[in-house]
Image (cartoon, rainbow, N blue to C red):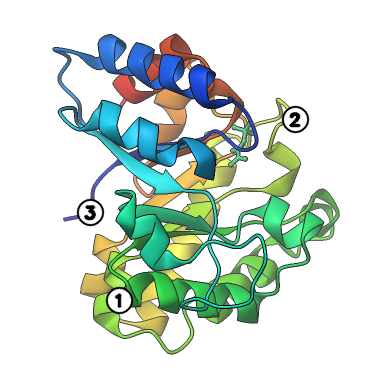
Amino acid sequence: MRKNIIAGNWKMNKDLSEAVKLVSDLKSELDGKTLNAVVIVAPPFVALEAVKSLIKDSPIKLAAQNMHNEDSGAFTGEVSASMLKSVGCEFVILGHSERRTIFNETDEFINCKVKQALANDLLPILCCGESLEERETSKTMEVVEKQIKAGLKDLTNEQIEKTIIAYEPIWAIGTGKTASPEQAQEVHAFIRKLLIEISNESVAENVTIQYGGSVKPDNSKELLSKPDIDGALVGGACLKADSFRDIILSV
Ligand code: PEP
């Protein structure tokens, strides 16, 4: 059965001492609470090891925000899957719209990263989502279908089942504009159908599909109550322990 997963993408925020404070605060906020979701934090690379040591005895799990698809070598500034594993990451966010638009990452490159993550026992959070122009010209499903099919290309059913998908309409990221629960559910249901086409019904039923895009404590409950929305990928609202806690506890 699929799990609800709430992940916080810290992006390029929090230096080492700020990261230590944020995760320590989050740990205290969640202490003694019953959690109905897997909780993940994705700090910047330089804070991964420190954050890992602080979450050791807690339900919080660790993700990286990106990685390279090669094992090692002359790739200045890049980080490999085995490096992420060595500091305790269990998950890695791949194909975030900021990677696609600012750093020109293609579907093919993202697919290589997804395969490399899985080969190294890291669970990928594969992001997809349309721009405002694409939504306004009724291209949402076409864009999402292309990104999902390309991102999951050549994966076995077992690997697809391990992959988490995050639907993040670009127009809703960091803008304060959230997709309505109905708009989000429509795309999530479409993605689930697509997964049946790519793999099979049982795999599709087991894949977690998160929603991302201005998720806040005041809209999370309604979004997360939709049948195909299995958690959230949270940006801005995960940078404060209390607002991230409220989103986590709304599941
Ligand atoms: C994100 O970048 O993944 C995101 C969803 O950001 P925000 O919650 O700030 O819109």
Q: Are marks 1 and 2 in contact (CB under 8 Å)?
A: no
Between 85 and 2, the residue placed more toward the observer is 85
The amino acid type of the residue labelled 2 equals: Thr
Q: Earlier in the sequence, mark 1 or mark 2?
A: 1
Mark 3 Cα shell of 10 Å, populated few (<14), some (14-19), many (≥20): some
Between 177 and 62, the residue placed more toward the observer is 62
Q: Quadrant of the C terminus?
A: top left
Residue receiving disc 2: 175
Residue receiving disc 3: 2
Report x, y in % for residue 43.
49, 36
Q: CA distance from mark 2 to mark 3?
A: 29 Å
Q: Earlier in the sequence, mark 1 or mark 3?
A: 3
Mark 1 Cα shell of 10 Å, populated few (<14), some (14-19), many (≥20): some
Mark 2 Cα shell of 10 Å, populated few (<14), some (14-19), many (≥20): few
Tell me if residue 246 comes above or below residue 193 in the rendering.
above
Residue at x 60%, y 61% (from the top left corner): 95
Q: CA distance from mark 1 to mark 3?
A: 14 Å
The amino acid type of the residue labelled 1 equals: Gln
Residue at x 30%, y 76% (from the top left corner): 159
Residue receiving disc 1: 159
Q: Secondary structure at mark 2?
A: loop
Q: Earlier in the sequence, mark 2 or mark 3?
A: 3
The amino acid type of the residue labelled 3 equals: Arg
Q: Is mark 2 within 8 Å of ligand 1?
A: yes
Tell me if residue 46 comes above or below residue 104 in the rendering.
above
Tell me if residue 195 comes above or below residue 57 in the rendering.
below
Q: Nearer the viewer, mark 1 or mark 2?
A: 1
